[in-house]
Amino acid sequence: MTSKEAIEKIKNVLSLSFKKEKFATTSLEDGTEVTNNLDSDFQIGQVLYVVGESTLTPAPEGTHTTREGYKITVDSSSVIVAIESSVADATKETTDETKEENMSEEAEAIVEETPTEVKDEVITEVVDALLPLIEEVKSLAEEMKKLKTKMEQEMSSLKTDFNSFKKSPEKFSVVEKKTFKESLDDYKLDVIKAMRR
């Protein structure tokens, strides 16, 4: 079973749904990926994050240069305080609007590749970790069903036995057993009673 098939199976069993999110991202000169974790372009006032394998970490304070030639300055809280172009060459200069469009286009291209891969990897790891647990829960649920059925059968049998016992006539009557002396005394008493009449 492939990871995608396993994910689909778990989605169906647990009635889960995953939503795909797009967010702006770009690479720094050293290859580090950064994002604002939003589906809009990088802007002043947004938090800048470093994209890890399966996590987002706030970017360190300072100025970070992107491969497109932008300098993104963040404060100690990782909030973007300035975005400026570092391209000094006149042939590379474009308007701010064109630069932002290029940055957005590259960010979208990276978003389409990397986050999906990261999410798939994370989901696959979660699925691999959850599969044994899901199987165990299924097994426990089956055992509980069997136990419930058995208990219901036992209770029904006990109820039937009790009702039949309740309806059955008394089988043993209590007989008073007298000794010979008591019988003789009773006989004498009967004779005396008969003589009085």
Image: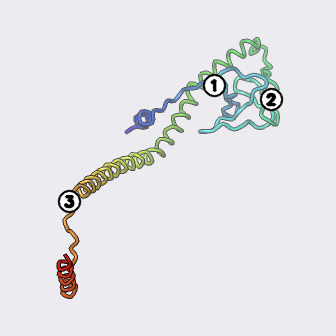
Q: Nearer the viewer, mark 1 or mark 2?
A: 1
Seen from the viewer's position, the closer of residues 22 and 132 is 132
Q: Position of residue 134 (x, y in %)?
A: 43, 45
Residue 2 falls in which quadrant of the image?
top left
Q: Which residue is mark 2?
A: 73
In terms of sequence position, does the residue under pointer 1 or pointer 3 come before the other?
1
Q: What is the spatial separation of the Cα atoms under label 1 and label 3, in whole angstroms?
A: 83 Å
| Residue bearing mark 1 | 23
> How far apart are the two marked residues, 2 and 3, measured between alpha carbons?
97 Å
Secondary structure category for the residue under label 3: loop
Q: Mark 3 sits on what residue?
A: 169
Residue projecting furthest to the front: 197
Of the residues shown, which amino acid type is indicated by label 2?
Thr
Question: If the image is split into quadrants, where does the C terminus sit?
Answer: bottom left
> Which callout, 2 or 3, points to the residue nearer the camera?
3
Q: Amino acid at mark 1?
A: Phe
Q: Is residue 35 left or right of residue 168?
A: right
The image shows a total of numbered marks equal to 3
